[in-house]
Amino acid sequence: MLSPLLSPRELSVFSTSYQNADDAFVASVAALGGSVGATELPYDGVGPAGESMATRKVWIGDPDAARVLVLLSAVHGVEGFCGSAIQQDLLQRLASGQVRVPKGLAVLVVHAVNPWGFAWCRRVDEQGIDVNRNFIDFSLPLPINAGYRELAHALVPGSSGSGSGAEVGSGMLQAGDERLTAYLQQHGQYGYELAVSGGQYEFADGLFYGGTAKCQARLNLEAIIQELDCPNRDVAVVDLHTGLGPYGHGELICDHALESEGLATAKRWYGDAVTIPEGGDSCSVPKTGLVDYAFHAAMGARSCYVTLEFGTYPIAELLRCLREDHLIRKQGQQPFTHSDAERVRLQLLKQFYPAEPQWQTMVLLRGRQVIQMASKGLLND
Ligand SMILES: [Zn+2]
C-alpha cells in the first residue's frame, strides 16, 4: 500500500536535459540489440552547451509489417521531457522482455522531432515556428487569423520585431492584460483560445506562429512519412504532448474530420475516451497546420492519428508563461542573456513538465495503456 506504483528505476526515464534524454534514448536503443533499425536525421543547430542535435528514428519489428505503431515526441520541443520518457519506457520494457512486439506489428519511434526546442526548453523551433502549425500548403496565400491580429501586441508587446532583449521586461505584459480580458469576455473561452492558439502566420515573434515556409522538423517528418508508406499499411500515430488539460490527465485528442474514417477508427481503437476539437468536447480547439494533416493525407481507412495530451496547470498560467517566454527569449537571440531568461526558462519547463513523481507516474501508466490500445486496435481491426 505504501510502495510506489513505479520503481525509481522505472521513473528514471525522465531526463533532466535534451542531451541527457538523447544519450539515454541511444542507450535504450542499444540495449535492444542489433535487430532494430536506428537512423539519425541531422538537425541544424546547437544546444545551450554547444551540443549537436538530431531527430532519431528507430524501427522495431518486421521491416515489412503491415501494421505500424508510430510514437512521436517533442514536436513542441520542451514537451519532449514527457514524450521521450514514454518512448524510453517502452524500449526498456521491450529490452527486459516485460513486453514484446507481436507478430505482424512494428513500432516506429521518432525521438525529438524538434530537438532545438527540446534543448533550449522552448515550445517553438529556432525560427520561433510552432512546428504543429507549420503543416500548411505554402504555395497558397497564408491563412489569416483576424483574432490574433487584433491581440498580437497585447499578447507579445513589440511583436513586429522591434526592440532588443535587453530593453524589454516582463512588466510590459501587464499592459496587454486588459485587452485580453476584454476579448475573452466578448468572445468566450473557446473564441479566445481559437484566436490566440489556433495558429497565425503574420507575427514571427508571436505565439503559435506557423512560419512562411517549411521548417526543418517538417522536412524531416515528411521524409519519415514518405518512407513509412502509409497507403499500404495500417498506421496508428500517437503524438505525445503536454500542457493542456487537468494535471496528469492523458487526453486522447483526435483531429480527424467529423464523419471521417480516421475518426471512426480512433473511436473503435480508443473508445469513448477520444475527444474531438471540431466537436467542441476537447481541451484543444481546432487548429491550422497540424502535423496530423500530413499523416491524414497519406493514411488509409484503417489508420488514425491521435495526440496524447497530458495536462499540467491551468491554461491562463500557460499563456502567461508563453507570452513571457516570447518576450524575453526571442528567436535568434540565443544564448539568452536577459536577466530574466533563466527564470522564464524554468517556469516554462515546469509548465510543460511538472517533474513530480505523481505526474510522472500518471504519464507512464497512461502511455503504456495507450500503446497497448493502439497495438490491439491495429492487430484486431
Ligand atoms: Zn504540444
Image (tube, rainbow, N blue to C red):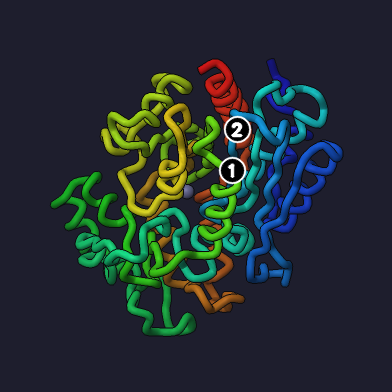
Using the image, tell me which numbered label, if any, was put on residue 367.
none
218 above or below 266? below
Q: What x and y, as percent, mark residue 367?
A: 59, 31
Q: Does any atom of ligand 1 lie closer than 8 Å to the CB of label 2?
A: no
Q: What x and y, as percent, mark residue 179?
A: 21, 63
Task: Judge left or right: residue 1 versus residue 242.
Answer: right
Task: Judge left or right: residue 337 versus residue 170.
Answer: right
84 above or below 135? above
Total labels drawn: 2
Q: Residue at x 43, y 65 (%)?
A: 324
Q: Are marks 1 and 2 in contact (CB under 8 Å)?
A: yes
Residue occupying the far front of the picture = 232
Q: Residue at x 32, y 62 (%)?
A: 200
Residue 89 showing in the rendered view: no
Q: What x and y, as percent, mark residue 40?
A: 71, 56
> The N terminus is located in which quarter?
top right
Q: Amino acid at mark 2?
A: Val
Q: Which residue is mark 1?
A: 228
Q: Which residue is mark 2?
A: 68
Q: Residue at x 45, y 33 (%)?
A: 300
Taking depth in this image into account, of 16 and 297 the one nearest to the observer is 297
Taking depth in this image into account, of 129 and 223 the one nearest to the observer is 223
- Whole-number angstrom distance, CA of label 1 to CA of label 2: 9 Å
The picture quadrant where one finds residue 12 is: top right
Q: Residues within 10 Å of mark 2 (few under 14, many from 20)?
A: many
Q: Amino acid at mark 1?
A: Leu
Precedes in sequence: disc 1 or disc 2: 2
- Under circle 1, the secondary element is helix
